[in-house]
Image (cartoon, rainbow, N blue to C red):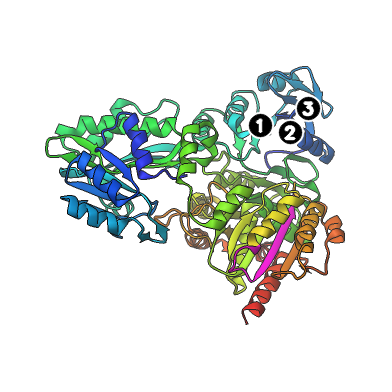
Amino acid sequence: MSVLVDDDTRVIVQGITGGEGKFHAEQMIEYGTNVVGGAVPGRGGQEVAGVPVFDTVDEAARETDADASVIFVPPAFAGDAIMESLDSPLDLAVAITEGVPTQDMARVNKRLSEVDTKLIGPNCPGIITPGEAKLGILPGNIFSSGNVGLVSRSGTLTYQVVDNLTDRGLGQSTAIGIGGDPIIGTTFVDALEEFENDPDTHAIAMCGEIGGEDEEKAARYIAENMDTPVVGFIAGRTAPPGKRMGHAGAIVSGSGTGTAESKISALNDAGVEVGDTPEEVAEAIEDLL
Amino acid sequence: MKLHEYQAKQVFADAGIPTPASQLAESVDEVLDAAEEIGYPVAVKAQVQVGGRGKAGGIKLAEDAEEAEEAAESILGMDLKGIHVDRVLVEEAVDFVNELYVGVTMDRGEGEPVAMVSTKGGVDIEEVAEEDPDAIVREHVDPAFGMQPYEARRAVFEAGVDREVAIDAASILQTLYQLWDDRDASEAEINPLMVTSDGEVVAADAVMNIDEDALFRQPELAEMEEESAGGDELEQKADEYGFDYVRLSGNVGIIGNGAGLVMTTLDLVDHYGGEPANFLDVGGGAKAERIANALDMVFSDDNVDSVVFNIFGGITRGDEVAKGINEALEQFDEIPKPVTVRLAGTNWEEGMEILNEDLVTVEQTLEDAVQRAVEHAEEVEA
């Protein structure tokens, strides 16, 4: 019915006493997410958004029997907060924070390879299984339940594509914002693998952008391992080399790697149609279903 | 953030990497004084952040005072690939027999640091990477452990560096890695790392780029950024406002929220036959004032003939956006450039009620809004 999160997912919020953490904890609860607690060092024993706060992630996970954590911790402390969630009995950590230093993420990435806990983000809008659970800041009201899986490096571009899908009556199984940073936890390949193994995901929209080589890797994975059809979109066709287009990861290097052309042709070679506009992506998905 | 050569050299020298004697100079007289003190021959090097300085005439050798004066006169004040040169580094000319390359960067694909060594230094290393990839040895480093001495030695010997200088070169590489790590660099490189006729190894150039997300814990480097500020006037203004902004060459101004969606809006302008003038991301949760500032930014670009405003609200609210657009436009007797607005997502209905439709063109979809803005730009041009 979905990937990674559903009705049963028990969620804690790291940074729940901060402005953003509290606001989005409330929003997640309002959406129907099973938020069971929070973790903030030195704030144990308090109650925020109707749930108990613990001093450590480990304690929060044990006391509430949580499965997942959403991280709203300022950039300077986010690397440490992610490490803490990876070193606890959780299955999934979702890091929303934007602006985490890249070297902190290199250390996180190393730890990630040693544990079973999965990470989505950082610098991402989170993950949503419409009608069941949202972990992050996605506006729940634009999503509807259905059979299209969606994975994207960008938040608002996700909303745009969802809007185009919903206009055509195409609901979503799960939507995952994997984030716009150079080093992230869940990659396109990881997300595609989850969707491929979900019997209720019948088609996938994959929204990439310039920078890095994750889309090229995804193209190879699709060609070799996938039966579920994928439609692609690549943002940044008009971006000049050497300029960071907002996201830290969205940059075409001087030597010409990470270009939109390279990603589009890799996807086309793997048999993936790439839309010129978000509307064309929704149209192509509709044709596939 | 890129450090200037003279700044990076100072950072390298402070960490114990051998660098040639050098002094910063801003006038012909200062160049001559510096050269006298250092001793001829010297190199006079433009301090601007563009690649291929040498080829473009930004680096000159001087054997004596006459040549130094000529070099200073031709380089100071010159326009190097669009950037005005107002400072040069006067540097002891190194008598070299070999030029090596050493660098440290983040391998995005692996999510791991990588150190690189090549005996083909002194030329554009990206060209070497393309034409002769085997000439560059790559050594991945565990970020938790840091670079071990044997890893630095392995890279240097593997690259074929002469045994006489290999240990020194390895030690410089390890120091470079340590600096990269300590200073939150995204890149640190020495090209060329010169081997002199008496078997010394010297950093003849220095490149260091710092992760902007880490400047909060690198106060010393953040100060250097202020010192080296420059570039496009509008991009400086965007810095003050705190926008992610990139200036481009077209005439359709673009404002939106979220990097991916703004990039997509640029691409659609191009798709429908227009040319984007800029990338401007107002970020998440922008309030009315920020929206008004964004319009002010784009209006102040003379190239802009038409503006498209595309907001898909998640944490950004449509009513705040509409208020900001009204505020920015109501101060004009005549709207300076036509503005097309598309609002979707959180509170878009409230936004549409607030928005003064006498001042803007409203469209319901992204595609329609972009097409309309491109049409407006064409009308203005005609």
Image quarter in which the N terminus of chain A is found: top right
Location of residue A178 with respect to B372 vertically, above or below:
above
Query: What is the distance, in whole Å, between disc 3 and disc 1 at their CAs?
Result: 18 Å
Pointer 3: residues within 10 angstroms few (<14), some, or many (20+)? many
Q: Residue at x 60, y 35 (%)?
A: A119
The residue tagged with tag 1: helix, strand or loop?
A: loop
Location of residue B118 with respect to A282 vertically, above or below:
above
Pointer 2: residues within 10 angstroms few (<14), some, or many (20+)? many
Query: What is the distance, in whole Å, between disc 1 and disc 2 at their CAs?
Result: 8 Å
**Mark 3 vs 2, N-terminal side:** 2
Chain bearing tag 3 is A
Residue type at numbered disc 3:
Val
Which mark, by number, is residue A21? Answer: 2
B288 or A46: nearer the viewer: B288
Residue A263 visible from this viewpoint? yes
Same chain under badges 1 and 2? The reply is yes
* Cβ–Cβ under 8 Å for marks 1 and 2: yes
**Where does the image place residue B99, in percent across and percent down from the top left?**
21, 45
Residue type at numbered disc 1:
Val
B155 or B102: nearer the viewer: B102
Residue corresponding to mark 3: A36
Mark in the foreground, 3 or 2: 2
Mark in the foreground, 3 or 1: 1
The residues colored magenta run: B299-314
**Mark 3 vs 1, N-terminal side:** 3
Q: Residue at x 49, y 62 (%)?
A: A261
Q: A193 left or right of B64?
A: right
Location of residue A180 with respect to A230 vertically, above or below:
above
Residue type at numbered disc 2:
Gly
Which mark, by number, is residue A73? Answer: 1
Image quarter in which the C terminus of chain A is found: bottom right
